[in-house]
Amino acid sequence: MIGRLNHVAIAVPDLAKAVATYRDVLGARVDEPCDMPEFGVTVVFVRLPNTNVELLHPFGDASPLTRFLQRNPSGGMHHVCYEVEDIQDAVGRLREQGLEVLDPEPKIGAHGQPVVFLHPKGVGGVLVELEQASRYS
Amino acid sequence: MIGRLNHVAIAVPDLAKAVATYRDVLGARVDEPCDMPEFGVTVVFVRLPNTNVELLHPFGDASPLTRFLQRNPSGGMHHVCYEVEDIQDAVGRLREQGLEVLDPEPKIGAHGQPVVFLHPKGVGGVLVELEQASRYS
């Protein structure tokens, strides 16, 4: 069911510093920051040849990252995102097998594609995002 | 400097259960377990079309994962591994820029290639493995 790893998301307490590390020290290609108020995050994509790293920083007062960064003040890996062909089909099949899908309905994610999150308890302790693969990527 | 994301490593408390989740629920191709006594881990690679997920479980009494799983009893993301062309060159350049490389010398990793780990404090709070890219991959 799952296809490509779309991205690994890393929550960082200092976005400018993390951008500088990935761009200037590790020598990767880094996009401009993009605010996503509906998710409470600012995202920066680090473009690797085969996938992306998503640097995440809280946006606004009710960001879901605030608590994560309180528990992990130096930052840390937040979630992985796997692509699926059809998000509604994937959600249906996973719910049938007892996995807890956190979103009642898919939302539109950072790439303009529908996404849902799976509860970590069903998938090895890791927050998993599923994103419907773009037909144009 | 960094190239492809070679793998994302996930530490899991129950390897058989994690394998079953990735293989039977998420429908991914999963390799056989491989014990790596010199690293104190058993690894299982989940093969995605563009990269791998490495499921990690402690091997032996002195595994570096034991403490991680005590702090994260449900499991969690442990490290990311980026490929570099030349590991000695990468280590030299990163040390010059003040990053702490944890291994005095590269070791041979799960793919038979030299690897080192970087201290999380220099790279956004995330444990980073660098692996010299295979010329044959």
Image: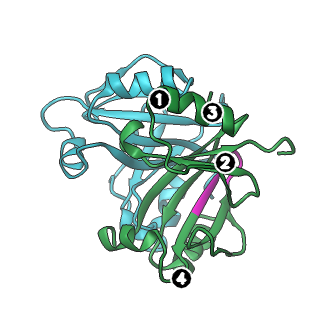
Chain colours: A green, B cyan
Residue highlighted by disc 4: A60
x and y percent of residue B83 in the render? Answer: 57, 46
x and y percent of residue B21 in the render? Answer: 44, 27
Q: Residue at x 50, y 25 (%)?
A: B25
> Which is closer to the viewer, label 1 or label 3?
3
Q: Please, what secondary structure does the residue beneath circle 2 have?
A: loop
Residue highlighted by disc 1: B112
Q: Are marks 1 and 2 in contact (CB under 8 Å)?
A: no
Amino acid marked by disc 3: Ala
Q: Chain of mark 2?
A: A
Q: Which residues are magenta?
A: A48-54
For residue A90, the mark is 3
Q: Are marks 2 and 4 on the same chain?
A: yes
Question: Can see residue A35?
Answer: yes
> Which is closer to the viewer, label 4 or label 1?
4
Mark 2 and mark 3: Cα distance apart in space: 21 Å
Label 4 crowd (10 A; few <14 / some 14-19 / many >=20): some
For residue A51, the mark is 2
Q: Residue at x 53, y 65 (%)?
A: B93
Label 1 crowd (10 A; few <14 / some 14-19 / many >=20): few
Q: Please, what secondary structure does the residue beneath circle 4 have?
A: loop
Extreme-top residue of the structure = B32
Q: Chain of mark 3?
A: A
Q: Are marks 2 and 3 in contact (CB under 8 Å)?
A: no
